[in-house]
Image (cartoon, rainbow, N blue to C red):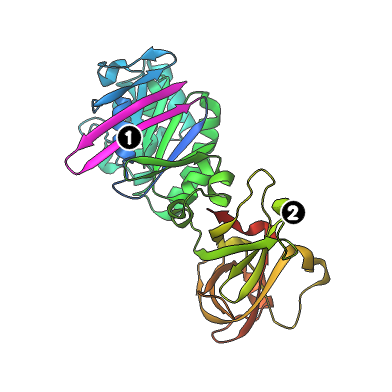
Amino acid sequence: MLELTGLRKSYAGFAFGPTDLSVGSEVLCVLGPSGSGKTTLLSLVAGILSPDAGCVSLDGRRLDGLPPERRGAGIVFQDGALFPHMTARENVAYAADDDARVEELAARFEIRDALDRKPAALSGGERQRVALARTLAADPDALLLDEPLSSLDAPIRNRLRDELRDLFDSLDIPVVYVTHDQRTATALGDRIAVLRDGTVEQVGTPADVLDRPKSEFVARFTGTDNLFDATVVGGANGRTGDPSDGVTLRVGDLRLRAAVPADAPVAGDVTACVRPSRVRLRSPSGAPPDEAHPGDENVLRGTVRRWLNEGDGYRVVVDVRGAPASLTARATPHRFEQAEIRDGAGVAAVVPAAAIHLIR
């Protein structure tokens, strides 16, 4: 168990913490924009920086004052930080107990063919594999990673991301993975911690953080483009009363139904947010019968302002009649064609009541 208690560090013009976090045998992805304190957090855990207050513990052992090499936490940097004058084999052997361990890790990371080359002769993916092998050669009690995939080409990054998930599952130690990329965080993290200006805004599972953000910052940073000022005007049937079955919202000239958990009633002015992936588009003329659930859906009429082909899908911006702002949806290629999307075309946007999350 890796524990951060009241951890705090100040620089000129920047303050990190106080922060309390616990990481068990899991992957905690630390997500945030540049300058939010992600690398500071790793540096404090690794012993590269000394905190102004608070402490770091690993498996019940306080790490205060210990140098990085005695902390039992292995760290992998963005550029790998390999020894340039050593071959890949020598880099891994630097931390390994014997040659057998080097061969074991080389097989695990598929770098046998690269062992006799120096870092300058390795591809970006090979350098990161060697860096991971060198770090794990020391059998760390915790693993820290500082955006190790961000400088790689997309195909290599996607492949290594898949491989890292399997690797982390096999380690059974705390893993703290720093990234600014939401896709990496959701793919690798058992939990996500969102940082903003040195403060942890939210910690939770990927589903919690993405679908139930606690602040507008978390919503926007994790890809929720649709945020609207709204007012709760009554229960699901439009009258005041128990909101446990949902509430009615006024958004501009629209009335929308939103599902609200029974243990989290809301009232008054709120921010309504909807992830683009939860919005379904269809042609105005109708939809397949199996998609018709009038009591659970809000069907909004509008026109297509613009669309963008993102490769594996389309991002579509719709001007909704009566809404104070446009609505963004993400459509699969099949849905895009079925809804006959084109600039200026009429379209219906279906927003399930359960897809609307309310922030007080």
Residue 200 x %, y %:
40, 40
Write down the quadrant of residue 352 in the picture. Answer: bottom right
Q: Main secondary structure of the magenta part?
A: strand
Span of residues in magenta:
1-24
* Residue at the spot of label 1: 17
Q: Can residue 206 be seen in this view?
A: yes
Write down the quadrant of residue 177 in the picture. Answer: top left
Please name the amino acid that badge 2 sits on: Asp
Residue closer to the observer: 131 or 142: 142
Residue 24 x %, y %:
51, 25
Residue closer to the observer: 149 or 25: 25
- Which residue is painted at 52% across and 29% down in the image? 26
Residue 320 x %, y %:
58, 78
Per the image, label 1 sits on a secondary structure element best described as strand
Question: Going by the image, does 294 lie left or right of 215?
Answer: right
- Which residue is painted at 37% across and 50% down in the image? 152
| Mark earlier in primary sequence (2, 1) | 1
* Residue at the spot of label 2: 245
Q: In this view, does 344 lie above or below 329?
A: below
Please name the amino acid that badge 1 sits on: Gly
Q: Residue furthest right?
A: 289
Residue closer to the observer: 55 or 248: 248
